Each structure stands twice: as structure tokens, then as C-alpha cells.
Image (tube, coloured by chain):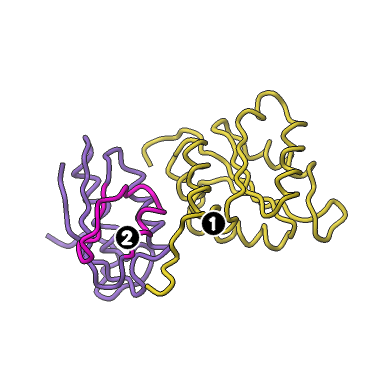
Chain colours: A yellow, B purple
Amino acid sequence: MPDQAPLVGIVIVSHSSALATGVVELAAQMAGPALSLTAVGGAPTGGLGTDADRIASAIAAADSGAGVLVIGDLGSAILATETAIETMSAGTAPRVRISGGPIVEGAVLAAVQASIGESLDEVLAAAESARDLDKGVGR
Amino acid sequence: MISVELEIRNPSGLHARPAAMFVRTAGAQQAAILVRNVSLGSAEVNGKSLLAVMGLGVSHGQCIAVTADGEDEEAAIEAIRGAVDGGLGETVEGTAGGEPEPT
């Protein structure tokens, strides 16, 4: 790889810990080992839900200077992420983007683009482009 | 600017995982990389975009044309040729594991 520039980190936020972990497993296999991919799933007390404190910690840990993209599964995953960003330092918060696109497809597309050194806005665009992904049904 | 035509021998074509490996190889090059599906007569797309490469719908046995444009274009084409011939992380028939052929 020609550059050592920091890569955009990706945090997957799901109501389900198992789902978040599985999405990270799949995206990591596609994007290779260089990328920071973190799963945050479940409520603070366990079970289904979201946890703004753990989301904030994961975002802070995933930021190596190039910023962090968070991909959430459903509504309150996005709300909890927005709450998490409000609690974060002025250094990191402006370098965080949220995608509400399809979580599996968005994570895979974003992870591969992040792994080749694309910018935060380009990685966000990749996640959002997952809405248009043609999976080849009936091809 | 240089181009090469390559046959995709992966059993399921340029589906998600090999397409991702293609994009990671292309993305490691400084040169701009464009790809089209020769067999389907498609338009050229950005070889550094997974969405675009998967969208080419390349199936087993089809040919792609890869164009590199930039200072490292020769090395870029060789890297991509090596990755495709090596199966893009999969086992394909007639693969020498991506090793260079003896001269």
C-alpha cells in the first residue's frame, strides 16, 4: 500500500449484539485487516437495545484522525448515536458521520472504500450508495 | 494510458468477495483505474469502487478490459493482472497461485 495515512474508522450500531458482530465479521473479511471496524450492539443491561455510552467510547477509539462513519440499523440506533456525538470532545465530534443506509450492504461497501484510503465523505457516500446496490436477482 | 483484457475464471464471476479484492488491488495504485465488461459491452466504470465493479455483473468466463492512467500505470496493470490471474482470493482452475510465470 502506498500511503500510511490514517483510514476512516467504521462503527456498526445495532439493537442486537449478535447482528452488529456479524456485520463486522462480514465487512472485515471484504476489507482486510488494516481497517478499524467496531461492533456496538445491545442495551446497557444486555438484551436488545442501544447504549449511547458504549457508542461514544467506540467512536472515540475508532478515530485515528481521518474520522469515523457510524452505520445504524434502526431508528433509535441513530438517535443513540446522535446522543453519543453530543457528549464527545470537540476534536472528534466534527469528524463523525452517520449513515442510515442498509446496514449489511452499507457496511461492506463503506469498509472496502475506507480500506483503500478514501475520505470520510467518500466512505459515507459509499454507505449511502448501498440503497442502489443491484444484488443480481434474476440476472 | 494502457489497457489489458482479462478473463474472469472465478466460479461465480466477479461477485462480492473477489470484486472487493479487485477494488483493494486497484485502490492501492496511484493511477486511475477504469473497468468495463467486454462480454456485455458495458460502459467503463471506476475500478476503485466496489459498487461500480459489482454492478458490471461479470460472470464466470466473461472478459473485462482494465485501463490504467497515471505515472504507475504499468505497475498498476501488472498488479491487477496478477491479482485476477491469481483468482482474487479464490481458487480458480488453471491458477498458479498468482505467481509470476517463469521466463
Label annotation for residue B56: 2
- For disc 1, the chain is A
Q: Residue at x 83, y 61 (%)?
A: A47
Residue stretch rendered in magenta on the structure? B34-57
Nearer mark to the viewer, of 1 and 2: 2
Asked if the magenta segment contains residue B48, the reply would be yes
| The magenta stretch spans residue A29 | no
Residue sitting nearer the eye, A102 or A27: A102
Q: State which chain disc 2 sits on.
A: B
Q: Position of residue B93 (x, y in %)?
A: 28, 76
Residue situated in front as seen by the camera: A74 or A71: A74
Label 2 neighbourhood size at 10 Å, few (<14), some (14-19), many (20+)?
Answer: many
Say which mark, if any, is on residue A46. none
Q: How busy is the neighbourhood of tag 1: few (under 14 within 10 Å), some, or many (20 plus)?
A: many
Residue identifier under label 1: A27
Please tell me whether mark 2 sits on a helix, a strand or a loop: loop
Question: Left or right: where does residue B30 sit relative to residue A65?
Answer: left
Left or right of A26: which side holds B74? left
Amino acid at dot 2: Leu
Q: Is residue B20 above or below residue A87?
A: below
**Same chain check for tags 1 and 2:** no
**In the rendered view, does B20 fall on the left or right side of A76?**
left
Per the model, the C-alpha gap separating discs 1 and 2 is 21 Å
Identify residue type, mark 1: Ala
Q: Tell me the quadrant of the picture where the N terminus of chain B can be found.
A: top left
